[in-house]
Image (cartoon, coloured by chain):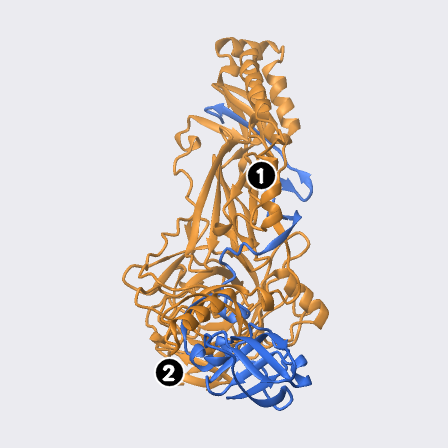
Amino acid sequence: MPAGLRRFLGQDIMVGEAVADTNSIFGKQVYQTTPTYFDAIKYMQQNGGITHENQVYRFVDENYDEYPLFAFRREFIDADHFIVSYRFRRGTPTSPEWGDESVGWIACPRNTEYQDSQPYRYAGAKWDDITEEDHWRNAIWFFNADIASNYHGGVFKWEYPYGVALGHEPVIDTIVQGYLTDELTAGAYQEVESGEYAGAYEPVPGTTYYSVYRDGMFITGSGDGPYVMLALMNLSQEIDSFEDDTAEAGGGYGGGYNFRSAHIGFPGLPTISIMDTGMASMFNPTPVQARAFANFLWSDDFFDNILKLIGDPLENVISFASVPLDLSTLHAGSEIVKVGNVSTGVGMPRLSHQYITVSLGTVKIPHKWWTALDYEPGSQIEIFLPFCGMFNLSASEVRAGSVTVQYNIDLLSGDFVAFVRCRVTENKSDLDDVLYHKTGNLLTNFPLTEANYASFYKSLVTGAAGAVSGAVTGNPLLMASSLVDSAMSVGSIQLERTGSFSGAASGMSCRSAYIVLTQPAQHLPGAYNKYVGYPSYLRRTLSSLSGYTEVESLIDNTVAAPDDEKAEIERLLKEGVIL
Amino acid sequence: MTIKLYKIKDDRRQLEKTLNAETLQRTMNGHLKSDCSIMDPIIEITYDPVLAGCNYMYIDDFERYYHINNIEVGAQRAFIHAHVDVLQTYAQQIRQLDCIIARQESKDHANLYLNDKIFRALNYKIINTVRFPKTPFMNGKQNVDSLVLTVGGGY
């Protein structure tokens, strides 16, 4: 299939040039999806499955777990080209939820210079029926059919549909990686279960390639067979230009500001732990093992006591604590614990890491009103982080985007840093950055001596001082008057929902992260727009408009009329006319 | 001067009124009562009962449309007080005006992300919570805790 715009399977597609880079794969697919996951589920339930061609859904269950399921089929068009069609479905091909419709496809010409598993050409498609309400309009998928086999990592490339005609750089919204259980074979569906969202990506300087990262680590291949990486890209971003005098509905353009965000991702962990030095070891005992250890410390056995006279074992116990985590995945074998030079005879699982990362996943914050009410001062968005407390997020940082939370934890001290990563690509934002860093301590220390207990008690008092207060501040009179006249104010009330949690208090606090959305209950009369109109502030010729119109100002009053009549025309236009 | 008298139901803010055979009530001859402004003329005509239902007129000499504000009736004479309808009179030219639009009926020409102080809201808020999907500090709905013992040297 030669490069260029082609018509295929009823869709316009752009077939691109071959890419010689061994790390590159490309297929791209324009798709549309519903604004919220629950809408998608509801739609499926009402309509007995996905029926709209080329719509892609991502599913979320009652626990807010989100898991798209991919399946792919490869069909050869000719010796050098094949089509990969894919579908999103919940369940498996044998489960009741599985449907028969393909919801997307890409054309991947095979480059005969390379082996079978490495298609290099790419294709794009656009949908003609993208609706204004579609949050993901003009988004495209990139399908990477081969990364893992060469362990070169997640480097992929895309080009804009219709070449330079689009005139701007698409912004990646989400990257999902899935793992194919088997290499694609013609005529068969391969089931893929999505792995972690890949998350971060960075441009490779001087190219249009992008390296893909997950949790701060460069993605490398793993497992047998190729794996699939899909990227959602929002093409609605435009590059601003001061010369552009054609403001469009949804926002004016005027800029010349092409600054791209740095996309500060989650940081990595320290590279040296106390275990690396041999100065200390960390264990994850069971309560039974802990009791055995305690029995050793306070035993009255003669030989034990002789050894303890030489070196007090307690001097070598650095800490004994509880952490609110399951550490069973960090076991590096069972060892007999020594304190100093004294063997306790007690075996315990030894921990392999001092520093760990835990992810709390991603939450999307969709629009509610699709108006200014979705942002401050109309709406207020707060986040509760376990062991940190509640704090405000800016709606501009999360609305119509997503929030991802990750903790980097030091198991020795219990200190952690919680990172809140905000991603928004709507309305010219290019945000995919860690914007919030919250510190705290999630360790509950168990004092072993009186000296320990003194510091333990002090931490309890400190924690209690920051306990929940639930205070309401703000001027109630001001609040009342402002809310009567405007829907825009919700910020006149400030709630102190939590204090800080540390030390022993942390173990008793809520352990789930969640977001609190406080939004106005908009009240609009019917046909509001016909009598009052919507805010506009756009430049238009009146002949292009119909219905109720208020004019802010005339560019030039060219009506051939006496001044008094011209003045009246301008007055009436500003008061509102019906065109 | 020839005067066409109409009975219309259109909003005064409507750019172009419904002027057709159905709304046209009479075509009559009249003249100015006295010196007056072309924007606010007083027209003297022969009394006709149909005048009572008319609220709009066109004066061909002035090539202007008028809202009828008041009709004074005397013995066999009537005096129509009118004010020019600049919207209808200059409708075609007005449509060619280039403007900055403050408010518009259609979302196609609106930006709902602009602050709109006309929006009203009820005095209570809609509050939702959204839980993050992963809970590493819990196992299902149960808290999960592990002991950590750190010793010097170790094993």
Q: Quadrant of residue A501?
A: top right
Q: Secondary structure at mark 2?
A: strand
Q: Is residue A107 among what the camera can see?
A: no
Q: Is residue A268 among what the camera can see?
A: yes
Which residue is rendered at x = 43% and y = 54% of the image? A431
Q: Residue B133 at x, y = what percent?
A: 60, 49
Q: Residue B16 at x, y = what percent?
A: 54, 80
Left or right of A255, for residue A340? right
User: Which residue is nearer to you in this view: B43 or B60?
Assistant: B43
Query: Quick check: A341 above or below A28?
Result: above
Which residue is rendered at x = 60% and y = 46% of the image? A483
Single out the residue that lies furthest toward the front: B75
Identified by mark 1, the residue type is Leu
Left or right of A14, for residue A385? right
Instruction: Point out which mark residue A4 bears.
Output: 2
Single out the residue that lies furthest toward the left: A206
Name the chain letter of the residue that bears numbered label 2. A
Left or right of B8, for residue B96? left
Chain identifier, colour orange = A
Q: Secondary structure at mark 1?
A: helix
Q: Quadrant of residue A207?
A: bottom left
Pick the quarter of the image with the N terminus of chain A.
Answer: bottom left
Q: Residues within 10 Å of mark 2 (few under 14, many from 20)?
A: some
Mark 1 or 2, nearer chain start? 2
Q: How many marks?
A: 2
Left or right of A417, for residue A246? left
Name the chain letter of the residue that bears numbered label 1. A
Chain identifier, colour blue = B
Q: Residues within 10 Å of mark 1 (few under 14, many from 20)?
A: few
Q: CA distance from mark 1 to mark 2?
A: 62 Å
The residue tagged 1 is: A478
